[in-house]
Image (cartoon, rainbow, N blue to C red):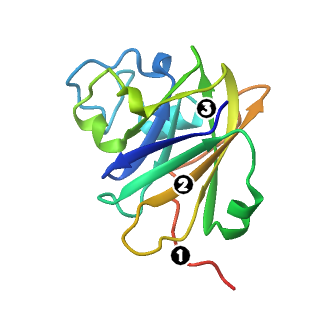
C-alpha cells in the first residue's frame, strides 16, 4: 500500500470506507442511512468488516484522511483519540465517502476517493490529531494485514474526539 490522502468536504455524521463488493446490492438513489438492503444496519456491516465507519465530531468540516501501512510514531504521540476497526478489501479497492451519501446512494465512487490496497483483511487503527484553527480535521489510518476478519463487537459507530492532548 502506498501512502495516500483522501480529502472529504463536509462528510456528514460519519465517514465510511468499503470495498465495492460490500455494497453491491445497494441501488442507485436508495436511502440506506437506516438499513441496508439485507435489513441490517451500518453497525452490523461494520462489525463484519464489510464497511468501516467513523463518527465525525464536526459533520460540516473538511477532513483529510491519511492512509498508510506504516505506523508513524510522531502521529501516535500527538493523537488525541483512536479507534480499532476492520475491513475486507477485494479487487484492491477501498472507497472513502461521507456518511451522508447513504441517504441518496450513488454506486460509483469518485476516483479521487479510491484508495489502492492489496486484497485481504485488515485491522485498521484510526487516529485523530487535535484540531487547530479552521483547517481540515486530520485522521490517520494505519492498515495492518490480518489473517481473518478482526472481531469488533461495536454497539454503535465509534467516534473520534479531537480534544487537545494532556501535557
Residue at the spot 66% in from the left edge and 83% down from the top edge: 166
Badge 3 element: strand
First in sequence: mark 2 or mark 3? 3
Q: Is residue 125 left or right of residue 23?
A: right
Q: Nearer the viewer, residue 70 or 97?
A: 70
Residue at image position (42%, 21%) is: 23
Query: The N terminus lies in which quarter of the figure?
Result: top right
Pointer 3: what residue? 87
Question: Quick one: SS at disc 2?
Answer: strand
**Which marked residue is nearer to the observer: mark 1 or mark 2?**
2
Q: Residues within 10 Å of mark 1 (few under 14, many from 20)?
A: few
Depicted 117 relative to depicted 78: above or below: above
**Residue at which label 2 appears:** 139
Depth check, front residue: 42 or 160 = 160
Please state the horizontal and vertical placement of residue 75, each as a whole percent of the image: 68, 61
Which residue is disc 1 drawn over?
A: 163
Seen as rendered, the residue at the extreme right is 147
| Residue at mark 2 to residue at mark 3: CA–CA distance | 17 Å
Q: CA distance from mark 3 to mark 1?
A: 27 Å
- Residue density around tag 2, few if under 14, some if 14–19, many if 20 or more, within 10 Å: many
Image coordinates of residue 111 in percent, x first then y, are 39, 26
> Would you identify the image quadrant in which residue 109 lies?
top left
Decide if residue 148 is on the left or right side of residue 56: right
Q: Secondary structure at mark 1?
A: loop
Where, by quadrant of the figure, is residue 34 drawn?
top left
User: Alpha-carbon distance for marks 1 and 2?
Assistant: 13 Å
Foreground label between 3 and 1: 1
Amino acid at each position: 500500500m502506498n501512502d495516500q490522502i483522501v480529502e472529504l468536504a463536509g462528510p456528514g455524521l460519519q465517514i465510511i470506507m468499503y470495498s465495492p463488493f460490500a455494497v453491491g446490492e445497494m441501488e442507485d438513489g436508495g436511502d440506506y442511512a437506516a438499513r441496508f438492503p439485507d435489513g441490517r444496519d451500518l453497525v452490523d456491516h461494520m462489525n463484519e468488516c464489510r464497511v468501516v465507519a467513523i463518527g465525525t465530531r464536526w459533520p460540516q468540516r473538511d477532513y483529510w484522511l491519511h492512509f498508510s501501512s506504516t505506523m508513524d510514531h510522531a502521529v501516535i504521540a500527538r493523537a488525541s483519540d483512536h479507534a480499532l476497526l476492520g475491513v475486507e478489501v477485494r479487487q484492491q479497492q477501498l472507497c472513502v465517502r461521507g456518511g451522508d451519501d447513504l441517504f441518496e446512494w450513488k454506486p460509483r465512487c469518485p476516483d479521487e476517493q479510491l484508495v489502492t490496497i492489496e486484497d485481504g483483511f485488515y485491522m485498521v487503527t484510526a487516529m485523530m490529531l487535535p484540531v487547530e484553527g479552521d483547517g481540515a480535521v486530520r485522521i490517520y489510518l494505519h492498515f495492518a494485514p490480518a489473517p481473518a476478519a478482526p472481531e469488533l463487537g461495536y454497539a454503535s459507530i465509534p467516534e473520534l474526539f479531537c480534544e487537545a492532548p494532556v501535557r
